[in-house]
Structures are given as C-alpha cells and as structure tokens.
Amino acid sequence: MITVTVRELKDKLAEYLRRVKAGESILVTERGKTVAVISTTRSAVEEYDRLRAHEAAAAESRFNEALERIHSTVAKAGLKPGVVKEAVRKSRRS
C-alpha cells in the first residue's frame, strides 16, 4: 500500500487510478492523518469479510470466556448446572 497526500492524489489522479485498477491500494492523508483508503472493489470486499470474520471470532471468544466464568461460579457455589439453567429459564418467563 502506498501513501499519498490529498494534493498528490489530485495532481496525479489518473496515475493513481491506474495503479488501483492494477490491484494496488492507496492510503490518502491530509495534514498527516489518514482520510481515505482507495482500493479495488474486490479488495474492499475481501477486507470487509476479513474484518467480519475477525469480529465473529472475537465475539465467540468473549462468549466462551463468559461461559467459563459462569461454570466456575456455579461449581464454586456447589450447584448443579441444571439447577442454574432452570432458574434462568424461570426468570426469562417472568
């Protein structure tokens, strides 16, 4: 990925668009801060899919950690998991 300023992009737009069409991604900055990323539609969709998969994996990890904490708490309290499950069911009906 190359980095260009807004001014550079405006001055050489045709050149940078050719590079994007060839599969390159461009990071656009203004006063040192990123304002845009230009890439082919295909690479943008791939990046979106990658981020969604990462978020799904992170959510699953958080869920598993919470479940482990619940199981640990239930075990420390000397309760059977079925008792807790039934209590949760009853509280949801209320």
Image (spheres, rainbow, N blue to C red):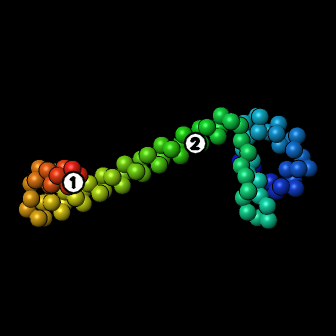
Does label 1 or label 2 sit earlier along the sequence? Answer: 2
Where 3 sits versus 50, above or below? below
Rendered image quadrant of residue 23? top right
> In the current view of this chain or complex, which residue is farthest to the front?
94
SS at badge 2: helix
Decide if residue 67 is on the left or right side of residue 1: left
The residue closer to the viewer here, 89 or 49, is 89
State which quadrant residue 6 falls in.
bottom right
Label 2, on which residue? Answer: 48
Give the quarter of the figure containing the C terminus: bottom left
- Please state the horizontal and vertical placement of residue 33, each as a whole percent of the image: 73, 63
The residue drawn where x is 61% and y is 37% is 45
For label 1, the crowd category at 10 Å Cα-Cα, with few meaning under 14, some 14 to 19 and many 20 or more, is: few
User: Which percent across, then down, holds residue 71?
Assistant: 19, 56
Judging depth in this view, the residue of 77 and 90 nearest the camera is 90
CA–CA distance in space, label 1 to label 2: 40 Å
Drawn side of residue 50 relative to residue 57, left or right: right
In the drawing, what numbered circle is on residue 28? none
Amino acid type, callout 1: Ser
Can you see residue 94? Answer: yes
Looking at this view, name the residue that lies furthest to the right.
11
- The x and y percentages for residue 25 are 72, 44
Q: Report the side of 57 relative to 80 (left or right).
A: right
| Residue at the image point whose x is 59% and y is 42% from the top | 47
Q: What residue type is labelled 2?
A: Tyr
Q: Is mark 1 on a helix, strand or loop?
A: loop
Residue 62 in the image: state x and y as whole percent. Answer: 36, 55
73 up-or-down from 55: above or below? below
Q: In this view, does 20 lie to the left or right of 10?
A: left
Mark number, residue 94: 1
For discs 1 and 2, the disc positioned in front in the rendered view: 1
